[in-house]
Image (cartoon, rainbow, N blue to C red):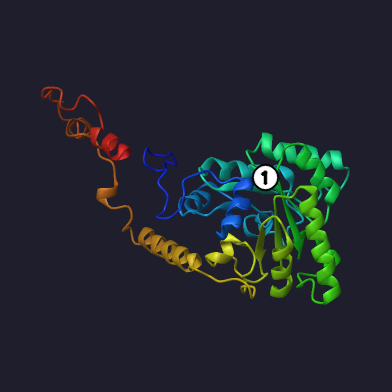
């Protein structure tokens, strides 16, 4: 049985990282102070807790979980209920980072009132502290922010538009397209978006937009000039089973680590090396004698608690 409780000293942050809770207004303050924002996707308790304890500023429960967690071809199949399930798990793990929930495809593409209602569910029922909405949906962003829910915008390569775009293609590749993207970003900020993700756009476009906006930009495949950066957790640690995109830098090889550990476990099981005697629970001396049919001896209550060593092992 694994334990996931917090201990008394668990709130400590890495050196140089403030323990103060991150909020959407705090992202703007970080931008004002010239502090770069770190963001990462998270989909479960364990990885969210590790990212939070490492000092990541914002965790996005991304609809990319459709692919990396559920095995779908793209992000379109994931449902509101599935997104909420993972958002709850992430929220339980987090003490400092801002928790943002992706609004999945179909949850805000109809009436504005429906989109607002779904955003409310993410905050009220799943514990999200902001929602992310793809595309230049100015009226929806305004309505959600008026409902007291912070919104993160998302422009450029928007994965939920994969069919319209004809695949995952770099966007805003000419001057006219950059100007349209800039206008959309400014309009989103005016509508109330607290930050904007810029994905899959040329560095120069992202830099120009970042310089003009009054709210932070978070880049993914948009060059180093944004106010912050985000990557998909599974890309970061090589758990995607696919070649990395150009903008991905892999900081570890979890696939190699996991595969090696699983293979060693299988081999130890097959050769009866695991579990060893030291990894096994034992009957008390008195109960071993009783099991052999020998008289049980009362030695000052020493064996009053059956399986005392097992209880101690369990607690440790």
| Quadrant in the picture for residue 238 | bottom right
| Rendered view: 239 above or below 46 | below
Q: Is residue 107 visible?
A: no
Q: Nearer the viewer, residue 59 or 314?
A: 59
Q: Is residue 97 visible?
A: yes
Q: Nearer the viewer, residue 89 or 247?
A: 247
x%, y% of residue 270?
38, 61
Q: Which residue is mark 1?
A: 130
Residue for point 25% across, 29% down? 306
Residue for point 50% across, 42% down? 95
Crowding around mark 1 (Cα neighbors within 10 Å: few <14, some 14 to 19, many 20+) is many
Left or right side of 218 for 110: right
Residue for point 24% across, 32% down? 308
Q: Quadrant of the N terminus?
A: top left
Q: In the orientation shown, which residue stands out farthest toward the left?
A: 299
x%, y% of residue 223?
65, 72
Secondary element type, mark 1: strand
Q: Quadrant of the C terminus?
A: top left
x%, y% of residue 97?
55, 48
Q: Nearer the viewer, residue 211 or 165?
A: 211
């Amino acid at each position: 049985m694994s334990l996931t409780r917090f201990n008394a000293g668990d709130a400590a942050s890495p050196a140089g990282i403030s323990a103060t809770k991150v909020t959407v207004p705090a992202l703007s303050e970080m931008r004002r102070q010239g502090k770069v924002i770190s963001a990462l996707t998270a989909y479960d308790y364990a990885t969210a807790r590790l990212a939070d304890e490492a000092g990541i500023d914002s965790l996005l429960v991304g609809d990319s979980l459709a692919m990396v967690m559920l095995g779908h071809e793209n992000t379109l199949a994931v449902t509101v209920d599935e997104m909420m399930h993972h958002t709850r798990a992430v929220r339980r793990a987090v003490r400092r980072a801002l928790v943002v929930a992706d609004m999945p495809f179909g949850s805000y593409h109809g009436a504005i009132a429906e989109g607002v209602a779904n955003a409310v569910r993410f905050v009220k029922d799943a514990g999200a502290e902001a929602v992310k909405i793809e595309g230049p949906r100015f009226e929806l962003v305004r309505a959600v922010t008026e409902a007291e829910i912070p919104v993160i915008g998302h422009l450029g390569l928007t994965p939920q538009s994969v069919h319209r775009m004809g695949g995952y293609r770099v966007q805003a590749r000419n001057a006219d397209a950059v100007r349209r993207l800039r206008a959309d970003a400014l309009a989103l900020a005016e509508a109330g978006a607290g930050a904007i993700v810029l994905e899959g756009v040329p560095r120069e476009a992202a830099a120009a937009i970042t310089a003009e906006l009054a709210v932070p930009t978070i880049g993914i495949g948009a060059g180093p000039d944004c106010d912050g950066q985000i990557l998909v957790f599974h890309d970061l640690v090589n758990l995607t089973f696919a070649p990395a995109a150009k903008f991905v830098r892999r900081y570890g090889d979890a696939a190699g680590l996991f595969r090696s550990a699983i293979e060693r476990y299988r081999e130890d099981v097959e050769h009866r090396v695991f579990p060893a005697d030291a990894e096994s629970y034992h009957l008390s001396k008195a109960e071993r004698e009783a099991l052999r049919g020998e008289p049980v001896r009362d030695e000052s209550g020493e064996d009053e608690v059956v399986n005392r060593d097992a209880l101690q092992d369990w607690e440790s």
